[in-house]
Amino acid sequence: MKLYIITGEPSGDMHAANLVSELKKEIKNIQIRAWGGDKLIKEDVQLVRHIKETSVMGFYQVLKNINLIRKNLAFCKEDILTFKPDAIVLIDYPGFNLRIAKFAKKNAIKVYYYIPPKVWAWNENRINKIRKYVDHLLVVFPFEEEYYKSNSIRAEYVGNPIFDEIKKKRPSFSYKINKPIIALLPGSRKQEIDKILDEMLSVVNDFKDYQFIIGCTNSFAKDYYQSFIKERNVKLVFGETYNLLQNAKVALVASGTASLEAAFLSVPQIVCYKTSLITYIIARFLIKIKYISLVNILLDKQVVVELIQQNLNRSNVKKNLHILLDENFSDKILINYKKIKKIFGSSNASKNVSKYIISSLKEI
């Protein structure tokens, strides 16, 4: 069996690597080429492009890097034809992956989309592309099955891979704890971090009884993160997001997967988001839901505070962090987190996706 996997972000790399691990348990001679990161490399996957070269976020950044994106698309298409896979597995990364899905359809290559774009939240016109170009849709939110069914698309709920990752045994936390920890998770892409981290760090000197620790991605060097810290008492940990969250009292979290991770690990949080003005204005027209954090979206109410764009500033972070550190307020959040966990039920997403792919390809 030959598979071609494409993802463009650290979270996608993690989920892709877990899927590869499960596939290898079932098929010993499987051949895989992929676009991804270090976790796929550790699974001995032949990497075509590293996420350091491909991760682009926001409308402005896409326009700015349009020539690079075009070159990557052209190279990817050529590489797929050369490799001749039995199927392509797309993981998140929708702007790029939906174009590859269209190409694959034209060339009679089966397409599996695992963790498809959140069209129920914004950019719903993508649903037509999914209907036309994706053969198998594997979703990670239970309500997505019914959503796609109502749009004449069959989708399979496979569980949420974050559960699988959280359940893994890992080495003990590298940091020696001597004060209550406030975790800072500013995102995994440079465009996010550049906009968000300074605002998070602006309140460090207002909470001297706490230790601020930044959960850093291995995609960037230590010097990059230290350039934000200046003279503040802030620590860095790399590649230990779950250990950091498990030991944190509260967290400031960039909107995205990390907000759900904090919920699953029962960490009260404030969700932060800031982007370029152009991207923000365009997004306001496209987004059709009330909230941006998955926690609030899933429960359809404000469970955690969202500080977005101009509201992400020192004054608001300080005020809301004081409120969050109040035990009574945090307890209310934790009660709602339990409701979220019930929504998802049990998991084993990577194993379920692996079995689905193998079973369906054997039927061909």
Image: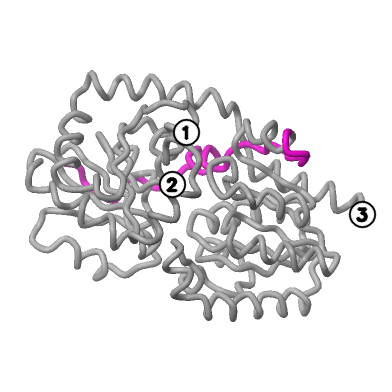
Contact? badges 2 and 3 (CB < 8 Å)? no
**How far across and down, in percent of the image, does residue 43 sit?**
60, 62
Query: Which residue is at a point 34% across and 61% down the rendered structure image?
Result: 276
Q: State which quadrant residue 337 falls in.
A: top left
Separation of residues labelled 3 and 1 (CA atoms):
38 Å
77 in relation to 319, above or below: below
**How far across and down, in percent of the image, does residue 126 sit?**
64, 52
Segment tinted magenta in the rendering? 150-178
Circle 1: element type: helix
**How far across and down, in percent of the image, does residue 312 sit?**
24, 47
Residue that carries the numbered disc 2 in the rendered image: 256
Left/right placement of residue 100 relative to residue 172 reads right
Most foreground residue, 42 or 317: 317
50 in relation to 123, above or below: below
**How far across and down, in percent of the image, does residue 299 sit?**
47, 26
Separation of residues labelled 2 and 3 (CA atoms):
36 Å
Most foreground residue, 339 or 161: 339
Residue that carries the numbered disc 3 in the rendered image: 364
Q: Amino acid at mark 1?
A: Ile
Circle 3: element type: loop
Separation of residues labelled 1 and 2 (CA atoms):
11 Å
Most foreground residue, 330 or 108: 108
Prevailing secondary structure of the magenta residues: loop
Q: State which quadrant residue 178 falls in.
A: top left
Quadrant (top left/top right/bottom left/bottom right) for the C terminus: bottom right
Disc nearer the start of the sequence (3/1): 1
Residue count near mark 2 (Cα–Cα under 10 Å), binned few <14, some 14–19, many ≥20: some
Query: Which residue is at a point 50% across and 49% down the rendered structure image?
Result: 286
Disc nearer the start of the sequence (2/3): 2
Mark 1 or 2: in front is 1
Quadrant (top left/top right/bottom left/bottom right) for the N terminus: bottom right
Residue that carries the numbered disc 1 in the rendered image: 297
